Image: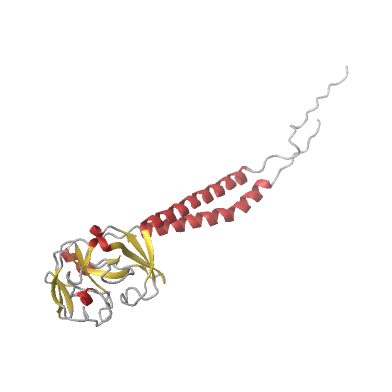
Amino acid sequence: MGGESTTRTAPHSGGTSKGPAGGRTGQRLSGLAVALGLVLFLVGFGWAAVTYLPYTVPSRSMTPTIDAGDRVLAQRVDGAEVRRGDVVVFQDPTWGDAPLIKRVVAVGGDRVACCRDGRLTVNGTEIEEPYLAEGQQAAGTNFGDVTVPEGRLFLLGDERQGSLDSTAHLTDAVSGTVARDAVSGRVDAVVWPMNGMLARPTGFETLGALSTPGPLPAIGAMIVAGAVLVLGGAACAPVASRLGSRARTEPAGAR
C-alpha cells in the first residue's frame, strides 16, 4: 500500500505581509497630531482676531511703558468695562482724527488733582505709579483739582512732561475728559518688540477693582501648542511611513 503525502501550501499573500502594527499606529498618531495641531492653531488665531485689535503707537507719549513704533494688542471692550489704571485706545474728535493711547487715571465722579509730593491724587489718595520714569513728576503741570463728570474718563500719558492728554484740554467744556463710549480697546500687551503683558496698575487697587487681564496668554499657548503638534506630527510622519513600509516575506513550500 503506497504512502500518502500531504501538501500544505502557504496562504497567498502576494509574497509579502502587512507592515508592522507599530508603523501603522505611528502613522495614525502623527496624522492625529497634525490634525489636532491645525485645529488649535486656527482656533487660536480666530479667537485672537475677534478679541484683539492691533495698533502701532505713533508717538512717545506713553514711554517708558510703550514707545513710538511699538506694536500693541488691545482687547475689544465696551467703555463701561474700563477701570482706573487701564491703558486704552480711544478716538475723540476734539483731540484729533486718529486713535490715541493713554492711561485712565480717574473715572466719572472721581476728583483728580496734582500734585502732592510730586504724586497724583484721586479722591484724596496718593497714587503709586511705578510705570513712570524714575524721578518723573505725576504731571507736566500742576493742573489743580478736576471732578470727572459721570460717564467720562480723565486720561494721561505715561510720559507726563510731553504728552498731549487731558491736561492739555482742561479749558474744554468737559475739563479735558473723554466719554467712555469713545474707547474701542484696552491694551493688554506690547507684541513688537516682544515686551509681553502690561504690568498691573496696582496703585489704583485701593480705589476699586482693577480690570481683569484679557485671554491673550491662553490664546498664545493655544497657538504655540498647535504649531508644536503640527511640526512634531509632520516630522514623525516619514519615520512612521518607513516603519509601515517594511514588509516581511514568508516562502511557500510543500512538506
Where residue 246 appears, as percent x and y from the top left, is 69, 47
Q: Nearer the viewer, residue 223 or 123?
A: 123
Where residue 38 appears, as percent x and y from the top left, is 50, 52
Q: Nearer the viewer, residue 94 or 157?
A: 94
Left or right: where 185 falls relative to 180 = right
Q: Is residue 251 above or below residue 143?
A: above
Residue found 64% across the figure and 49% down from its top? 241
Where residue 56 appears, as percent x and y from the top left, is 39, 70
Q: Quadrant of residue 157?
A: bottom left
Where residue 75 appears, as percent x and y from the top left, is 33, 60
Quadrant in which the N terminus is drawn: top right
Residue found 35% across the figure and 57% down from its top? 215
Left or right: where 44 falls relative to 187 = right
Q: Looking at the image, which residue sits at the far bottom?
A: 135
Q: Nearer the viewer, residue 223 or 72?
A: 72
Left or right: where 44 falls relative to 234 = left
